[in-house]
Image: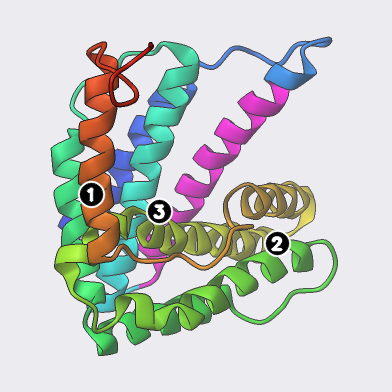
Amino acid sequence: MTGEALGTSERAAARLAAAAAGLPPLRAGQESLNEEICDRLIDLAAAHAAVARTADDGGRDAAARSVDACVCRAVEDDVVRTLSRTGTRLDGGPSLEDAHREVTRIVTRLAEPAHYDAVCALLRTGLGERPDGRAAGAWDIADEALRGLVSARAEWAGADPACTAAGGWVVVDRVARVRLTAALLAQARALGGDDAEHLVNAARRYAWNWLRLPPPEAATAVHVRRTGELAAWIKVLAAGGPATEGGAG
């Protein structure tokens, strides 16, 4: 990874850390809230693991840069999710337009079949062999999600980015979450002891939260047209217009 790209990953993780700092402490009798707080802290642990893993990876190719860009995008989404729970205010984050431009750039590159294959191969290498014990649960979910990316190849590779970019958020998120789960598992293997047990539990929960979904489908020209129709219809409703022809009789 280049120094500039690594700086982007580090900044994204730092923003998530600052947002997570506003989370309330866990309290007895508030189990539902405690679960939510724990999930946001696990997002932070995954971001830290991914940054540490990337720093140790050495040379970076185009596929690795795409994966890292997906991770940054997912971490920024985690920042927004955490802020919505805490009321913490952070400045300097990307706008919705900037985020969409980044997703479009990633998905346009993934439309190149060789590049898509290289990204999937990199994720497979990062996931490694199936571990023993409880870690296998997280690995199995990530493995299934990765096989879903491979099975959905025709949705993205060789497709028209003008349409697929409309649904690009879902493939970007899937690439990132596989990478982040793999980073937690790799850190568990490297550290061992009590730290490994906690990291395995974090990886299991992270994979359960983010990767138990069907393979990501790309947008089509019909989907894009219906988006425009739905947006126009909802704006009419929001402005107090009639829901049906002629309104109430």
Residue carrying label 3: 51
At mark 3, the secondary structure is helix
Mark earlier in primary sequence (3, 1): 1
The image quadrant where one finds the C terminus is top left
Magenta extent:
34-57
Please name the residue that numbered disc 1 is placed on.
Answer: 7
Q: Position of residue 49 (x, y in %)?
A: 50, 52
Residue pictured at 53% horizontal, 48% vertical: 46
Q: How is the image coloured?
A: rainbow
> Quadrant location of residue 164?
bottom left
Residue 132's label in the rendered image is none
Name the residue located 59 percent from the left edge and 12 percent from the top edge.
24
Labels 2 and 1: the sequence-earlier one: 1
Residue 54 horizontal/vertical position (percent): 38, 63
Q: Secondary structure at mark 2?
A: helix
Q: Main secondary structure of the magenta part?
A: helix
Q: Nearer the viewer, residue 53 or 203?
A: 203
